[in-house]
Amino acid sequence: MERGQTVGNDFKNVIYSSNNETASLLLQGAKLEEALPAGSDNGADAAAAFNPLFSEATDATGRTFTLSFPTVLANLGSGRMQINDKILESIEITNDLESQNTLITFNAKYTLIYDITYNPQTDNTEIHIIKPFTQTDKLVVIDPGHGGSDTGAFYAGISEKDLNLKIAMKVNDILKSYGINTYMTRTDDTYIPLHERAGIANNLNAALFLSVHNNSYNTSEYGTETLSYPTAASRQFAGIVQKTLVNALGTKNRGIIDRPNLVVLYETKMPAVIAEIAFITNTGDRKKLQDEQFMDKAAAALADSVLEALDTILIPQENQPAG
């Protein structure tokens, strides 16, 4: 069933879509998370953190997953959606009058891998159910930094989150054209918690994790740098990214920086890097970042880096610091 079509006569505000790798259930007007109060103890996520208003349960087979939440949070109707595509057998929505909860049960054709994202801008919740990958699939997770209420750097009317997404989408398109398996942590202006980004990559058995960012500091700082977790494989990946970006863009080479305290680097189990393309706060760099051809070059360089890394890096099973 294609995106944009309402599914079944008994359902309300529910849209299902799927392809060979991912199924998605969009719940319109379903506010299943709430913003945590300012100053909550959530580390790097404190600026834009959300508390789930739902509970999750998976059966012993791993193929049946149930999401439960107070019925007042969403008007979805009820019924059974028989799907039988490459990912799901069916979805069932029931309303428990005693507990006043709505339950959504997914019956899949394999062990479930899923993530749940609430978008406060649209007041919608989207549930992604993802086809599992193996190491031989060489999946690359592409992570456009920031998103939603987390703008990242903001200077001279430019939001880092928007630049990150544009470049990351271009990287994804290039890699797909080469037949590389990819998954993007976000494809629109949605906030995804840092721990969830790392968890998605781990659950999908990704071979590489590439996070796309842009930098900010004082106006005199400029150039390109790559952040890495201190493992041999991650450093090797960072070296490839840094070399390829600088050669392609002609930007100042600020080198590779070990950042063992960043969530998306230390929680990922595969080689992971953050590519800082240029500085939004620098006049020269900012002008480059507003040039579509510059973004195209950056995306092509990142895609080339991934291709080289997939061919040359021995992918470890765990992301442990180098000795």
Image (tube, helix red, strand yellow):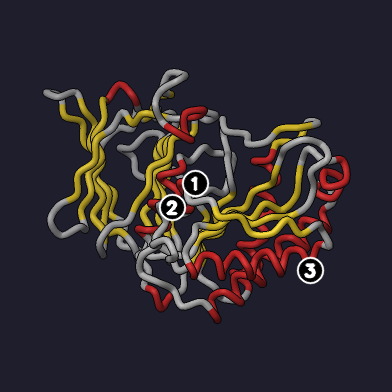
What residue is pinned by disc 2?
266
State whether residue 309 is above or below residue 288.
below
What residue is pinned by disc 3?
247
What residue is pinned by disc 1?
262
The dot on residue 186 is none
Identify which amino acid the numbered label 1 is placed on: Leu
> Pointer 1 and pointer 3: residues touching (CB < 8 Å)?
no
Using the numbered discs, state the Cα–Cα distance from disc 1 to disc 3 in whole angstroms. Answer: 26 Å
> Pointer 1 and pointer 2: residues touching (CB < 8 Å)?
yes
The reply to whether residue 123 is visible in this rendering is: no
Using the numbered discs, state the Cα–Cα distance from disc 2 to disc 3 in whole angstroms. Answer: 28 Å
Near-viewer residue (22 or 186) = 186
Near-viewer residue (296 or 99) = 296
Near-viewer residue (150 or 261) = 261
Count up the numbered dots. 3
Residue 32 position, x and y percent, is 36, 30
> Pointer 2 and pointer 3: residues touching (CB < 8 Å)?
no
Identify which amino acid the numbered label 3 is placed on: Asn
Residue depicted at x 55% and y 65%: 235
Residue 130 position, x and y percent, is 38, 58
- Residue 201 in which image quadrant: bottom left
Near-viewer residue (131 or 88) = 131
